[in-house]
Image (spheres, helix red, strand yellow):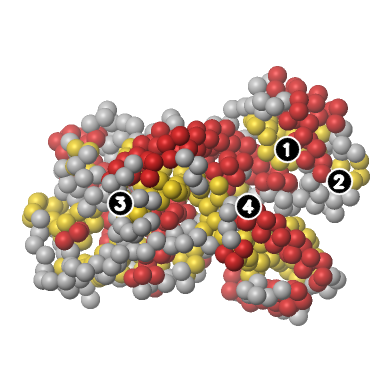
Amino acid sequence: MNLRIAIDTGGTFTDVVAINEETGVQHAVKTPSTPADPSVGLLTGLRKAAEAAGGCAGDVGNVLHGSTTATNAVLEHKFEGLGLLVTDGFRHIIEIARQSVPDGYGNSFFWVKPPRLVPLHLVREVGGRLDYEGNELAPLDEDGIVAVVKELVADGVTRLGVCLLHSYADARHEQRVGEIVAKHFPQLFVSLSSTVLPEYREYERAMTTLIDVMVKPYCKTYLNHAAAEIQRESGEIPFLIMQSNGGVVSNRAAGDKPVTMLLSGPAAGVLGAAFMSDLAGFRDILTLDVGGTSTDVSLVENLEPQLTSNSLIENYPVKTPMLDIATVASGGGSLAWVDDYGALKVGPQSAGADPGPICYGRGGTGPTVTDAALVLGHLPEALVGGEIALDGKAARRAYGLLGAQFGMSAEEVAAGVMEIAAANQVHGIRQVSVMKGREPGLYALVAFGGAGGLFAAVVADFLNITTVLSPPAPGNLSAFGLHVSDIKRDYIRTLVRQKSTADGAQIEAAWVELEAQGRREIAAEGVAEGAIHLARSADMRYVGEGHEVPVTVLAGLTGHAAVNHIWAEFHKVHMRTFGFAYEGKQDVEVVNLRVQAVGRMHRPVVAMCDALGGAPEPDHTRPVYWRGQGWVECDIFRREKLTLSNALEGPLIVEEYGSTVVVPEGWWVGADAHGNLKLEKVT
């Protein structure tokens, strides 16, 4: 037996999908996450999935992994021990940041800057200077480096970011700093901006580098531990880690540059959703991934997830290529509470994995979304195939107390909590659709995650969406998405050149150099030459603009044809993005050249369903509370018993191992040949 196992570590559960490479049969399991040491839950899930497939850890031939560890470190403000080295005269780079105020604050009198990753007393200057083309203006002060790092270590610095001026143009000064620090202070974790983000804009480069080194101890430690345990139980097998760009790399590469892991788990979910929607016949989708602590949403057009290189994790800029995913604090563990003005709120606080919702019986005291769903009859008496028994009486007592504050019954306030949670999710979807000129009603909604099916129809109603898909094993879709990923690496070179004076040969040479680096590093991951694909793009703007738009080069274009293409295509992209263009009126400049190197991996074969026959019988019935209707005795169906030749009209509920799909009145639900549930609005 040869098993390929994918593991997605979330805030509450660790989801695992094992695929038998010989038969194609899939097995999905869940196990509680272990935030104190994510590798414990990872190994537990691996063993559990192998056993479910009829094997053991020794039968595992490949492990893929997505994780929220890097993101959680940032969200929890684990800034202790961070230090920064900058070029002489640039000590205040983090303090100054950008001279802009976030939308919604009006002016700087009402906006308080977020906590600095590094306080000023832990920032040190280094002598030496390069110009914007990489020419040395002053030699590096090597003796001074040792002295200032010694001071930082004495002040408690354990993680050091290095961001020297213009190191994107020439990395030699930063590389020498890295060598000196490694020699004299081997205990320090170090990140160089020329490695993390060789791109101009000093503030964003410094912040991205600091976040990289900030999460490095957490990610590298647990990845190394997990790799050692996997090797002990399964031998020398590939251990690949999902990145924010939707591709995987070796665990060693991910540990060396963990900033690429910030949206690791959610990115895999988007890939899985796109794969299954393609089988269902939908190419334009919105994704709704509702987990234990948050909801991740994204937009996919023509089966291509949207990419961005300008992201915020909390209030901190991170300029690495990521899938364009918006996250809102609305998940199954989100707490319901009353603010100082007497308004009912849901989130952003969460009960997390420990202690979890009140109904888990692990010491939780605050009512959560999961408790609300149980009070309403939307959830069964136990989750994960009976492994987690739910205490419905405790959940109802909590909502009875909450409802008393508003003169409402337990079920009325629970229904209100579910509606508020759904409204929060709708806000996230509007960020990736309406705010970017897309009409949500023109897309299918793919709902997954453990709680995605609870909200899918309600969210769709809010947005005038008429089709909802629930893929097979939706609670484990992010883990499945790892199975349909490729090995990916992104490369960038800042090369500011205006069209009127640019040397096309120089632009082509830079692309060729990036492509050569990509081929080498993807080949080093064990990918055959014929499976390596390279994609070019450029960040461009009109001369005088402060920000760029990405312009993609058509596949197969090289040389002058590629250069001429971006000059012409830019005007069209600018028009689509902003609604205007200055072709023939304003010079254009390229700012960054990019290459994405992709090593194609084989895809699993999704088994076809052959269950035809008549309408299925409900497994049982139970009272379910519907807002505006009250309590209704509803049919409860097992998902595996739904057949291809029928559609059922709500209200009803569909249950399975790791998720529950709620089908309200006014919706139909049926299964397709690939195991997707398809909900359609009654017209």
The answer to whether 347 is drawn above or below residue 311 in the figure is above
Residue 582, percent across and down?
Answer: 71, 76
Q: Say few, some or many: other residues with alpha carbon within 10 Å of mark 1 (under 14 / 14 to 19 / 20 or more).
A: many
Q: CA distance from mark 1 to mark 3?
A: 45 Å
| Residue under the image location 30 percent in, 51 percent down | 27
The answer to whether the residues at label 1 and label 4 have Cβ atoms under 8 Å apart is no
Q: Quick one: SS at disc 2? A: strand
Left or right: 622, with 342 as reference point: left
Q: Which mark is residue 162?
A: 1
Find disc 4 in the rendering and name its residue.
524
Residue 49, percent across and down?
Answer: 33, 45
Q: Quick one: SS at disc 3? A: strand
* N-term-proximal mark, 2 vs 3: 3
Residue 301, percent across and down?
Answer: 47, 70
**Residue projecting furthest to the top:** 154
Find disc 3 in the rendering and name its residue.
27
* N-term-proximal mark, 4 vs 2: 2
Query: Which of the pair 123/464 is nearer the observer?
Result: 123
The answer to whether the residues at label 1 and label 3 have Cβ atoms under 8 Å apart is no
Q: CA distance from mark 4 to mark 3?
A: 31 Å
Q: Quick one: SS at disc 1? A: strand
Query: Which of the pair 407/368 is nearer the observer?
Result: 368
The answer to whether the residues at label 4 and label 3 have Cβ atoms under 8 Å apart is no
User: Where, quadrant-wise, is the C terminus in this rendering?
Assistant: bottom left
Going by the numbered disc 3, the residue's amino acid type is His
| Residue under the image location 36 percent in, 54 percent down | 19
* N-term-proximal mark, 1 vs 4: 1
Report the number of numbered marks: 4
